[in-house]
Image (cartoon, helix red, strand yellow):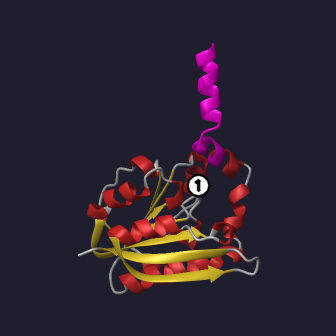
Amino acid sequence: MLDKIKSFVKRKTSQKYRFNLQYTNHKWDGLATLAELGRYSLIVGFSRYFTKGIDAQILDLGCGEGILQEKFSKEDYVHYTGVDFSDVAIANVNKQERPNSTYLVGDLNKLVVNGTFDVIIYNESLNYLSDPKEAVMKLFPHLKPGGVFIVSLVDKYGKEQTGLWDMLNSILDIQESNKVINLEGNSWTVEVYKIKS
């Protein structure tokens, strides 16, 4: 009986359970508001800049309900793949008709990827990983030559997540960095990286 209780408590306190519950209760609906548009615009703009003239394959890691994809035009990619560990978020996005798209449930800590991509995006998700450096490096073989990683992180409590940025700069070549601040005073940093040559 004690093992069953421990198992139940572990499951109910897991990060995946919390995210599923939050999506069920619409806690993340605010991600689709005007207040979030600035960071999405930076991500889309960087993607367009680095993929112009090619049929881009985009991988969105921590995609939630696919809000970022909605900011892209159909001409921005030939295929869009989103991965999130919330079953609820992926079920919600899969209810919609999204041509040239695949949305999958997956744990970004144990991600197995098929294919190669021109753009790999961590949109507010890298900070949730247990070993972000290992996760990013495992994706090196899946980034096409000339492809980019785009990372967006919220600057919580007015403090940037310098440890993550330092880690990324130790393994990748930074191409650009921008910060966006909305009227509510929330700020995000969005950076673009290529694999070191």
Residue 169 pos. (x, y %): 39, 72
Tell me the element at label 1: loop
Three-letter amino acid code at disc 1? Lys
Residue 163 or residue 99, whichever sits in front: 163
Q: In which quadrant is the N terminus drawn?
A: top right
Q: Say if residue 151 shows up in the picture.
A: yes
Residue picked out by circle 1: 95
Q: Tell me which residue sits at (63%, 27%) in the image.
A: 8
- What's drawn in magenta, residue-wise? 1-19
Residue 163 pos. (x, y %): 49, 65
For label 1, count other residues whose C-alpha is less than 10 Å away and answer few (under 14), some (14-19) or many (20+).
few
145 to the left or right of 46:
left
Q: Quadrant of residue 185?
A: bottom right
Q: Tell me which residue sits at (75%, 81%) in the image.
A: 183
Q: Which secondary structure dominates the residues rendered in magenta?
A: helix
Q: In which quadrant is the C terminus drawn?
A: bottom left
Residue 117 pos. (x, y %): 33, 68
